[in-house]
Amino acid sequence: MSQVLISIVIPIYNSKKILPNLFEAIYAYAQSRSQEKYEVIFVNDCSPDDAWEIIKDLQSQHPDFVRGIKFSRNFGQQPATIAGIAHAKGDFVITMDDDLQHHPEDIPLLLAAYQQEKDTHIVIAHLQNKKTTGFKKFVSNMNRRVTSTVLNKPKDIHLSAFRLIDRFVVDKMLEIQTAFPFIPALMFTVTKKVVNVSLEHRERYAGKSNYSIKRMVQLSSRLLINNSTLMLDMIATLGILIASLSFLGIMTIVGLRMSGIAFAPGWVSIISSIYLIGGLILFSLGIIGKYLQRILVEVTNIPNYVIEDII
């Protein structure tokens, strides 16, 4: 019986210091496993350091184990992950971060969960004792809530970038054409047969996270606009609410007038109402503009990424 091939996909950005140790950890793990055969695909998201040179050196030393993809510019983690998945040959694809907080030694737990759970297509690591702190942790939690709302995922499923995806889901994900890919959205479009396995969130080996608070907020906004109509629904609901309140206000004024209650009209309330309505209109136009921008990008077939080199 032939060995199962497992592809490990890792987006790389600002990872020069971590990359050698990351590779050694993956290679040592793969060498210890006789049950499966492994390949690792490093996707260089136009990293500003010398990460691509290291990837080339690793590939030349281990041509049957290491593959590399280099982007022409920085496209982001989601397109980089999709590019790696698109070039993966494995029966299963495992995605993980490049900072060793997702450790290769935990891969058997993903495989075991897949084998134990019947009729499962995806296993996602539920990371325990996450190392994020302070305001960034708050933003991260809010981001997870937005993701849960937009994706309509099962409430008991926790998301992370450390996941195992079988070939069926991989193939179906790649059939979905979108200019703004988001891996969890693609996964839950294909299947809801997903399970979690609890894993420890390890200490970062070196450097700091490339996900700043600004980028996390941008990710949430893109998720809201690219994968749902939630913002448009909120605008419609807000419009109905304002119209209802305005109607109640008019009826109240009419009632007071008919009761003979006199009151001096003030320009402050009028100006405040104008500014409120004007601000809401501009906000609504901005949201609609974002959707129109996404539509324009989709119909013009702008690629998710541009590959400069493959080794």
Image: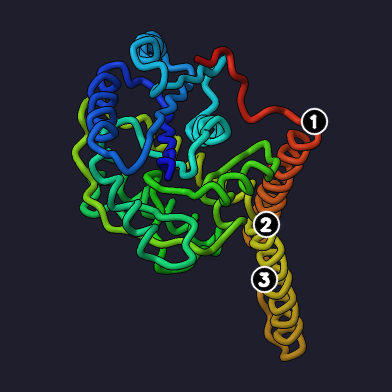
Label 2 and label 3: CA atoms lie apart by 18 Å
Work out whether residue 267 can be spotted: no
The residue under the point 61% across, 56% down is 189
Q: Does 23 sit left or right of 182 as displayed?
A: left
Between marks 1 and 3 in the image, the one whose residue lies nearer the viewer:
1
| Disc 1 residue type (three-letter) | Thr
Q: Position of residue 52 (x, y in %)?
A: 41, 12
Specify the label residue 22 is tagged with: none
**If you read the primary sequence from the N terminus, does the residue marked by circle 2 or circle 3 appear first?**
2
Please tell me which residue is depicted at 46% across the width and 44% down the height of the picture: 92
Q: Position of residue 278 (x, y in %)?
A: 70, 51
Q: Which residue is mark 1?
A: 300
Residue 291, given in percent of the width and then of the height, sits at: 72, 45
- Residue 11 visible at all: yes
Q: Which mark is residue 241?
A: 3
Closest to the observer, 78 or 90: 90
The answer to whether 131 appears left or right of 216 in the picture is left
**Numbered mark located on residue 229 in the image:** 2
Mark 1 to mark 2: distance in Å? 21 Å
Does the CB distance between marks 1 and 2 fall below 8 Å? no
Where disc 2 sits, the SS reads loop
In the rendered image, the vertical position of residue 244 relative to residue 283, given as above or below: below
Q: Residues within 10 Å of mark 1 (few under 14, many from 20)?
A: few
Please name the amino acid that badge 2 sits on.
Thr
Judging depth in this view, the residue of 198 and 6 nearest the camera is 6
Disc 3 residue type (three-letter): Leu
Which residue is rendered at x = 44% and y = 59% of the image? 145
Q: Tell which circle, 1 or 3, labels the residue nearer the N-terminal end.
A: 3
Instruction: Look at discs 2 and 3 and give the one toward the viewer.
Output: 2
Q: Are marks 2 and 3 in contact (CB under 8 Å)?
A: no
